[in-house]
């Protein structure tokens, strides 16, 4: 897997639609809230609603981190996130929180899911960064997240469950654990050319690694050098999305020690190149985020309601 810093990736021109960036902003309770930003081109994002939260959580810890936004296969949208108030400690979290919406404006059905109800995670002290992808074969959503169980000497690893409503979930099972035994968090899975590429944070090395599988449920294969981050800075919270109508996939990641974001690009999931900082902007210090491709109509609806 080639990973070079000698050249920059050239931004591709988005052929249609817009982009919605879903994020939070910090470790204080008032900053562990869902915010939105928008982009015309997939590289330059501007906050809406004055940078203020668009959802105020009422259940669980009343704070969330690592929001992931996706489309409902039957119309509408979901957001899933880590249910966590970080001021209570990094080992205080044992659940996720979910919402649904019909219009990206009004969010309802807020559900706090406590993973202590499951036998396999009844001692969990970390249920981090949930994401989801629709499994067409199962006709359900495949939800994956990082897990650590209190009292276990096993490192953080990636687990999964199935759901069809983001309220009830199947018994969690492990999906992937690095052969190195190191902590793996912040997984993001993309389907490309019939394979499933998982990029995740190596929590020990503070970088992004990639594994691949023929099926969504694995097994995920590691190559000898599976580091794909085009930076030596500490990064996490990686998210991949396609530039509409092109072959380019952009990976955004939280350069959390530098209070800024980093972008890189690939067209084949083999060669990654950094994007020159002059070619992208996220000048609003977001933390771990996700990106949803949206239509021009959805974009206009958000701007008309929240303002820019």
Image (tube, rainbow, N blue to C red):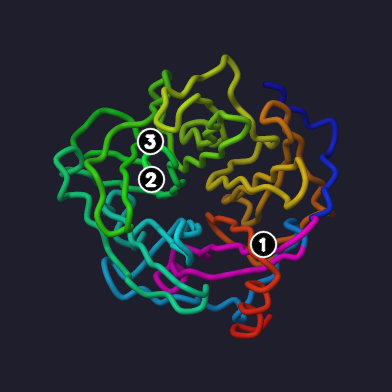
Judge from the rendering whether residue 242 lies leftward or rightward of residue 8; answer left or right: left
Task: Give residue 135's quadrant in the image.
Answer: top left
How far apart are labels 1 and 2 at the CA level? Answer: 26 Å
How far apart are labels 2 and 3 at the CA level? Answer: 22 Å
**Which residue was labeled with disc 2?**
139
Relative to residue 72, is residue 122 depicted above or below? above
Q: Which of 202 and 171 is in front in this view?
A: 171
Judge from the rendering whether residue 173 lies leftward or rightward of residue 119; answer left or right: right
Where residue 80 appears, as percent x and y from the top left, is: 40, 58
- How dense is the environment of label 1, judged by Cα within 10 Å: few (below 14), some, or many (20 and up)? many
Q: Quadrant of the C terminus?
A: bottom right
Say which label, 1 or 2, has the lower sequence index: 1
Dot 1 falls on a residue whose secondary structure is: strand
Say which label, 3 or 1, has the lower sequence index: 1
**Which residue was labeled with disc 3?**
158
Q: What stretch is highlighted in magenta?
A: 15-40
Dot 2 falls on a residue whose secondary structure is: loop
Q: Which of 224 and 258 is in front in this view?
A: 224
Relative to residue 247, is residue 291 depicted above or below? below
Where residue 137 appears, as percent x and y from the top left, is: 41, 37
């Amino acid at each position: 897997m080639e990973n070079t810093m000698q050249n920059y990736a050239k931004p591709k021109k988005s052929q249609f639609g817009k982009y919605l960036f879903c994020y939070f902003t910090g470790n204080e309770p008032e900053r562990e809230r869902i915010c939105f930003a928008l982009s015309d081109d997939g590289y330059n994002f501007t906050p809406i609603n004055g940078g203020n939260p668009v959802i105020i959580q009422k259940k669980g810890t009343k704070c969330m981190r690592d929001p992931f936004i996706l489309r409902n296969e039957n119309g509408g949208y979901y957001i899933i996130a880590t249910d966590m108030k970080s001021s209570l400690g990094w080992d205080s979290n044992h659940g996720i929180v979910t919402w649904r919406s019909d219009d990206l404006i009004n969010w309802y059905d807020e559900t706090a899911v406590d993973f202590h109800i499951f036998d396999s995670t009844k001692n969990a002290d970390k249920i981090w960064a949930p994401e989801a992808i629709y499994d067409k074969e199962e006709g359900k959503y495949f939800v994956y997240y990082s897990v650590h169980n209190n009292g276990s000497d096993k490192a953080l690893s990636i687990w999964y469950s199935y759901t069809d409503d983001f309220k009830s979930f199947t018994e969690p099972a492990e999906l992937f654990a690095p052969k190195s035994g190191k902590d793996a968090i912040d997984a993001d899975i993309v389907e490309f050319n019939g394979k499933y590429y998982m990029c995740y944070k190596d929590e020990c090395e503070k970088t992004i690694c990639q594994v691949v599988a023929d099926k969504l449920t694995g097994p995920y294969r590691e190559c000898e050098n599976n580091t794909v981050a085009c930076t030596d800075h500490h990064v996490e919270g990686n998210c991949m999305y396609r530039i509409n109508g092109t072959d380019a996939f952009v990976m955004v990641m939280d350069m959390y020690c530098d209070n800024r974001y980093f972008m890189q690009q690939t067209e084949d999931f083999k060669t990654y190149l950094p994007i020159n900082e002059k070619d992208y902007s996220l000048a609003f210090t977001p933390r771990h985020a996700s990106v949803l491709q949206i239509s021009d109509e959805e974009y206009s609806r958000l701007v008309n309601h929240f303002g820019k």
